[in-house]
Amino acid sequence: MKNTLKHIRLAPLLAEEILKRIWSGRYPAGTRLASIRELRKEFPVGKHSLESAVAMLACNGYLKRHAGRTPLIRMDRRSGVYRIAMCDFRMPERRTVRYETSPRSWLFKDAVAQALRRRNCHCVSIGSPEELQAVAPVVDGLIQFIFIDRPVPPICGFAAPVLTVKNTVEEPLTANTLYTERDQALEKAAYYMISHGIRSLVSLQRGSDPLHNEREKHLRRILRNFGWSGNPVQTLATGEVMEKNAVGPLRAFLHKKPPLPLGVLAQGDLLARGAAGLAVEMGLRLKKDIVIIGCTGIPEAADWRPAVTSLTSPFQAMGKCAAEGILRLIAGEKELPPRIVHGQLLIRET
């Protein structure tokens, strides 16, 4: 089995890129879109991915197809149909997306985009101030994502309504902001580990990651509140969040013969998967000798063998709340009270 989950949803990303150029006027309405052969010179991807992206845009009403001719670009405006930009300036522009880059960011935005499309809204992802400036004249609302690991200043002075999504509540709550947090899920994870009698606990992470450091701090506090008297949490640096990078540090730790059962909190589900594979290889019994919990919520984690238990942000609930919030702001509400959406613990084989 491959160590990475490669290209995910490439056609929708291509459709978003073409859509941004339509919104900004780079591909003017009333003209014809370039042929697939010409588009491949600008987007170095497969023919079928581009054909799928063009089909998606045609279904959303941005392109009108004619037999034997390239599609006509349209910018129809219908009552009750809004154009919403999803902004995350910390993510560099890329046409090939890999889960290892920042799975949480892409899962957040996917959840919001799906919820908006169910409400008959069009949306695109914005990755730079220049892109935002280009589409600003036709945008009805903006959702900005701010993550604790690489915070960016909020957008101010934007003409359209702005809703902010943050993945932490370690700060005063502010209006027009949707917060996601994992304290409740961490409590469940701590209780689950203690109920399985863990005597030692390690944290797998890529060097010093601010978000995972926050998780470790909260987990230590929760374990103390539960009266846990095991050894202090030990952090194992792994490098990138990939399966193979979990093996070396965890194997070296297990050779020191720590007290079992061992609890493992992994920064990402891929690290958790690597830890589970090593545990099986070394003859450790899952949920008996070792309890492994990942912290991403990758949907494919449920299909892995062994399936990875995951501490996940509530992507679907967050998407629903964000879509409802931005539509209320567009409809004329001046200020929304802050909302908090709580995380989940998805218990599986590990």
Image (cartoon, rainbow, N blue to C red):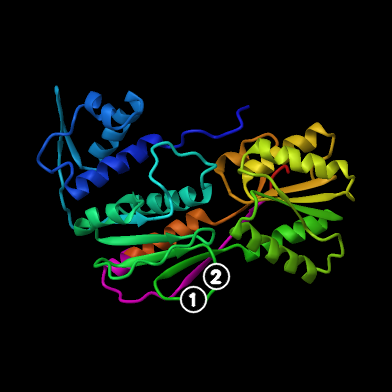
Q: Amino acid at mark 2?
A: Val
Local SS, label 1: loop
Q: Residue at x 20, y 27 (%)?
A: 35
Q: Position of residue 62 (x, y in %)?
A: 20, 42
User: Left or right: where does residue 251 sit relative to residue 341?
Assistant: right
* Res. 41 image quadrant: top left
Dot 2: element = loop
Q: Which residues are magenta?
A: 327-346
Residue 272 percent across, percent down from the top left: 68, 43
Please give the name of the residue rendered at 43% of the width and 52% of the height, measured from the top-left corner.
109
Q: Position of residue 220 (x, y in %)?
A: 74, 65
Q: Is residue 179 visible?
A: yes
- The kind of residue on which mark 1 rests is Leu
| Residue beneath disc 1 | 173
Q: Which mark is residue 169?
A: 2
The front one of 129 and 159 is 129
Pointer 2 with pointer 1, Cβ within 8 A:
yes
Q: Is residue 228 left or right of residue 247?
A: right
Residue 67 got which mark? none
Question: Could you tell me which quadrant the C terminus lies in?
Answer: top right
Residue 220 vertical position relative to residue 114 in the rendered view, above or below: below
Across and down, in percent, residue 212 comes to 63, 57
Q: Residue at x 31, y 34 (%)?
A: 53
Assess disc 1: are there few (<14), some (14-19) or many (≥20) residues with their C-alpha within 10 Å of its C-alpha.
Answer: some
